[in-house]
Every structure is written in C-alpha cells, then in structure tokens.
Image (tube, helix red, strand yellow):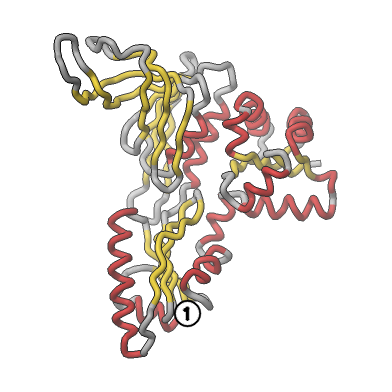
C-alpha cells in the first residue's frame, strides 16, 4: 500500500508526505518532509516496535585504538521515545537488534536513533494491533496547514509567533522604548530584522502581519507578508489572532471546535457524550461515536487499548482528533480520563 499525501502549503508547489505499508510484514516506511511530520511518527511508534534506517554512531573496528563516527544502517528496538514539538526532534532509544553486514560489535548495544525530516525510516509494528489506524494517523499529516510566522505589532510592542497545526509558540517579544511618531520607522526596521532572522531559521510558508490597520499598513511597506487587521498588536494581538481569522482552519483541525461542541452537549444532554475509557469503549463497540477526542499521552501510556479504540471509531466512520497534552483542551481531557466522545444517537 503506497500513499502520497498532498499538503497545500500556501506556496505554488504542494508538499508530499510519502509512506508505504507492507501489511504482511507489518512494516511502515515513511519519509517525513517537515518537522510537524515527526509528531505523527512519534504517535505511531510504540514500545517494542523496531525502527530501521540510516544513522551515525561511534564504531571501533578490531585492531584500532580509537573509534570514529560511522554512517550505518541498523535497527533499534524501541524502549523510550523523546519528542520535542518546536525543536523538530524525535529520538528513539533502545538496543540494536540488526546491523548491516560488515559491522561487528554493535548488535546488542544501546543506540539513540534520530528521526529527521528528509530521511526515510522504517517502523515494524511488533504487536497485533490493526494497521488501519496507522494509515489514518498518517493521513492526519494532510492537516498540516501552512506554517505561519505571525508578526503581531502596534506602536508599542511586536510579538513574533510560529503557528502550525501543532499549536502556537511565541518566539520573541520586541518593545518600542522610543514611541515618538518620527521614530516608528526605526522600530519597524528593528522588527524587520527580527522577521528576517526568524524566517531564515523556521522557513515558514507565509508571514502574516497582524495589528491595528494603520500600523500594519505602514509596516507592510518594509516587511513582506499578508495583512490581518485587528484591534490589538503585540502579545495581546497574538491571542486575538488565535481567536479569529486565519487561525479558524487550524482550530478545526486541532479539535477545538469538536471540544466546544462536546462541552455544549455535556451541559445540555449528558447522554449525547461519553467520558472516560469505559464509557467511550462501550460506545465504540456499538458504533455510536461521531467524534473521538483522545489525548496523545493516552496513546503512549495505554497503546493497545488506545489503538483498538481508534481503529473501531475509524471502521464506523467516526472522526478522530488526537489532542496534545500541552494545550488547554488537553488539560480538560486529562481530567476526564484522557478520552471523550460525541455520540450519534
């Protein structure tokens, strides 16, 4: 099974996340293109899975006094995972279970396997969980909407944030200590310098200027980007932007709208929702789930139960939202037992 997921990035050329699944061998080959893709790969790898690919490690052949860093193809049995959202880092740690021919003394030793964009990795699912959920999670990558470098500014402050389907990270805040009208251009020049530095580092699909109309119109003469007029700028403007405008599409993909609908039903018709693993599992077993909200750490803490639940929901054409723990929704979901659902009837 081969899939090509087209992600419209807001630029002229679509991005393709490529994956291939060998159902007989229970092997998933995937090529992450963007840092956001690492999150979905992180979700797929469970303890005991085997991860294969090219890596670099210290190697000392017999007869040599000192070792050297050598590129080699090997496989690690996953014991622990370390994922950092905005750092674009995913590491798998465990013992080496396979190594390419000609490399001695490495098998059985521990290794840290770095998964990075642009390098294909192979994941062998060692359990007996259904692979249909794996396909659906890979398809979630298509929700990776344009990566936005947000510049929220007024005449007093400029806040710079990185907005992706994974959330919003405030990167830097720049304050204008000299607010005279004739010095606004100097402040904008400082803002432009920061924008160019962050653009080189993060390579966003687009830059958006948000803030009072007169300010961003003036800044737009010096900083290239789309304009999103709003009442406030600076750090307050970042939160205003999150509540409206371009962020609406992101809110839908991140499950914000589904969660709000869940809270409304919870307050008006308790029988129309399920809360916690027991209620949600029971509803899934009879095909009642319209939308499932599942915390990402639940997948890591109880993988067998979580993956079977996700698979059941997909089979009955329900929608699945995987919610990050480090979000406002995640905190609410954690308090409800990690999973909740909107019911059909």
Picture layout, residue 9 above or below residue 91: below
Q: Residue at x 42, y 26 (%)?
A: 93
**Residue 121 locus on image (x, y percent):** 37, 27
Picture layout, residue 301 above or below residue 239: above
Examine the image and state in which quarter residue 210 appears.
bottom left
Examine the image and state in which quarter residue 110 appears.
top left
**Residue 184 locus on image (x, y percent):** 34, 84
**Residue 262 locus on image (x, y percent):** 73, 50
Q: What is the crowding at mark 1: few (fewer than 14 residues within 10 Å), some, or many (at least 20)?
A: some
Residue underneath mark 1 = 212
**Residue 54 locus on image (x, y percent):** 29, 25
Nearest the eye: 136 or 178:
178
Examine the image and state in which quarter residue 161 appears.
bottom left
Quarter containing the N terminus: top left
Picture layout, residue 179 above or below residue 243: below
Nearest the eye: 49 or 60:
60
Q: Residue at x 37, y 47 (%)?
A: 14
Is residue 300 rendered to the left or right of residue 98?
A: right
Nearest the eye: 50 or 321:
50
Q: Residue at x 36, y 32 (%)?
A: 114
Q: Residue furthest left?
A: 64
Is residue 198 rendered to the left or right of residue 142?
A: left
Q: Secondary structure at mark 1?
A: loop
Nearest the eye: 83 or 303:
83
Q: Residue at x 37, y 63 (%)?
A: 207
């Amino acid at each position: 099974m081969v899939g090509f997921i087209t992600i419209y990035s807001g630029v002229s050329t679509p991005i393709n996340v490529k994956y291939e699944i060998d159902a007989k061998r229970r092997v998933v080959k995937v090529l992450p293109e963007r840092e956001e893709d690492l999150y979905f790969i992180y979700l797929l790898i469970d303890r005991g899975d085997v991860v294969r690919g090219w890596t670099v490690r210290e190697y000392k052949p017999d007869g040599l006094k000192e070792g050297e860093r050598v590129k080699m193809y090997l496989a690690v049995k996953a014991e622990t995972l370390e994922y950092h959202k905005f750092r674009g880092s995913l590491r798998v740690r465990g013992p080496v279970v396979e190594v390419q021919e000609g490399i001695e003394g490495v098998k059985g030793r521990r290794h840290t396997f770095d998964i990075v964009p642009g390098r294909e990795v192979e994941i062998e699912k060692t359990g007996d969980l259904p692979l249909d959920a794996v396909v659906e999670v890979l398809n979630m990558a298509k929700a990776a909407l344009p990566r936005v470098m947000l510049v929220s500014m007024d005449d007093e402050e400029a806040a710079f944030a990185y907005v992706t389907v994974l959330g919003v990270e405030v990167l830097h805040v720049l304050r204008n200590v000299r607010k005279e009208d004739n010095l606004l251009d100097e402040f904008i020049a400082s803002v432009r310098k920061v924008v160019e530095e962050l653009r080189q580092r993060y390579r966003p699909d687009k830059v958006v200027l948000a803030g009072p109309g007169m300010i961003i119109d003036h800044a737009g003469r010096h900083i290239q980007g789309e304009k999103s007029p709003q009442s406030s700028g600076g750090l307050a403007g970042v939160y205003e932007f999150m509540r409206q405008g371009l962020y609406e599409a992101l809110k839908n993909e991140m499950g914000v709208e589904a969660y709000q609908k869940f809270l409304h039903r919870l307050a008006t018709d308790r029988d129309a929702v399920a809360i916690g693993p027991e209620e949600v599992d029971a509803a899934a077993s009879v095909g009642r789930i319209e939308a499932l909200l599942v915390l990402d750490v639940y997948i890591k803490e109880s993988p067998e139960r979580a993956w079977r639940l996700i698979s059941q929901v997909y089979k009955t054409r329900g929608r699945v939202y995987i919610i990050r723990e480090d979000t406002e929704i995640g905190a609410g979901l954690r308090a409800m037992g990690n999973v909740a659902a909107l019911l059909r009837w």
